[in-house]
Amino acid sequence: MARIGIIGSEGRMGQAIAALLDGGEHACAGGVDRGHDPADLAGHADALVDFSAPGALSVNLAAARAAGVPILIGTTGLGDEHHAMIDEAARDIPVLQTGNTSLGVTLLAHLVEEAAARLGPDWDIEVLEMHHRMKVDAPSGTALLLGEAAARGRGVALADNRESGRGHEFGGHTGARATGAIGFAALRGGTVAGEHSVIFAGEEERIVLAHSAENRAIFARGAIRGAAWLIGRPPGRYTMRDVLGL
Ligand SMILES: NC(=O)C1=CN([C@@H]2O[C@H](COP(=O)(O)OP(=O)(O)OC[C@H]3O[C@@H](n4cnc5c(N)ncnc54)[C@H](OP(=O)(O)O)[C@@H]3O)[C@@H](O)[C@H]2O)C=CC1
Ligand SMILES: O=C(O)C1=N[C@H](C(=O)O)C[C@H](O)C1
């Protein structure tokens, strides 16, 4: 039985993880939220899960590193500077970072990469997502993960081909779609747990690969599985694809 410490424990995801740990295969080592140092928690946990905010990342990684415990980063809205911090910490401890811990999205990313590789650049790729009204980052971490998978399938860098936010700031004239672009669109409303579609639009036909999250338990289940999987691994940066062998 692993003792899992939750950073962001009072949040939607923190509560979903605590609920699954209660009476489950692994135990909850406790939780921290804004204003609380995660160092103590790291000292008596076998692994940490972080579903808080990008601004908390450096403190959370430092706590995990000092205690020598693995950490799963589920927080989204990360920038290049955050990825650099994760790479740095992964020299000393196992770190798993993912925009989506669910089994379904992990498999979807695999399928998207395969489709993008086989279809080639003549098929336009658009990633569409919808989430609940409280979500603060856009596009979602999952949309970016799927965009990265599509770019990898095409053998290009997402950063060089990303196109999002078409709209009024261009006076209504956004220009024709750039060849090879991977587009992103984000919708927000209600209590949607997470909807993602990757649309491959070709000449007179379209393929849509999609995932619907019916609730947060799917993310919580994957987070617990991922955190437990990290225990005893060598230092390094891991993904859910490593956990699931995909
Ligand atoms: N990878 C995945 O599979 C998934 C990732 N997510 C991501 O997880 C994150 C959390 O989502 P969600 O639970 O819905 O968000 P919530 O806002 O409900 O929860 C975030 C929690 O973290 C706390 N928090 C904020 N800043 C800090 C800090 N500096 N240190 C410690 N705790 C802090 C918040 O406290 P306070 O309220 O005081 O700010 C809150 O309790 C988001 O980035 C979201 O996109 C969500 C679902 C699945
Ligand atoms: O904030 C959320 O709720 C979610 N965030 C993750 C993301 O940004 O993709 C995962 C999931 O879609 C729910």
Image: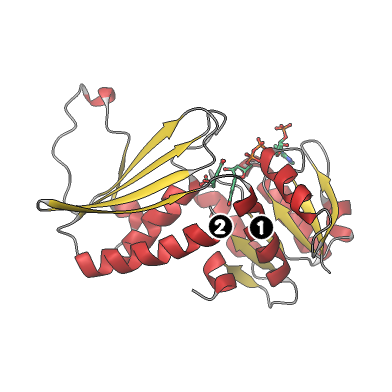
Of residues 221 and 53, the one nearer the viewer is 221
Name the quarter where the N terminus is drawn.
Answer: bottom right
Give the residue type at disc 1: Arg
Q: Which residue is mark 1?
A: 221
Residue 48 horizontal/vertical position (percent): 75, 58
* Label 2 residue near ligand 1, CB within 8 Å: yes
Q: Secondary structure at mark 2?
A: loop
The answer to whether mark 2 and mark 1 are in CB contact below 8 A is yes
At 19% from the left and 64% from the top, the residue drawn is 120
At 46% from the left and 65% from the top, the residue drawn is 107
Give the residue type at disc 2: Ser
The answer to whether residue 225 is left or right of residue 43 is left
Question: Which numbered disc covers residue 40?
Answer: none
At 32% from the left and 60% from the top, the residue drawn is 151
The quarter of the image that holds ligand 1 is top right
In 3D space, how far apart are the residues under numbered discs 2 and 1 (Cα atoms)?
7 Å
Question: Is residue 203 in sight in this rendering?
Answer: yes
Residue 28 horizontal/vertical position (percent): 84, 55
Question: Which numbered disc covers residue 102?
Answer: 2
Residue 114 horizontal/vertical position (percent): 32, 69
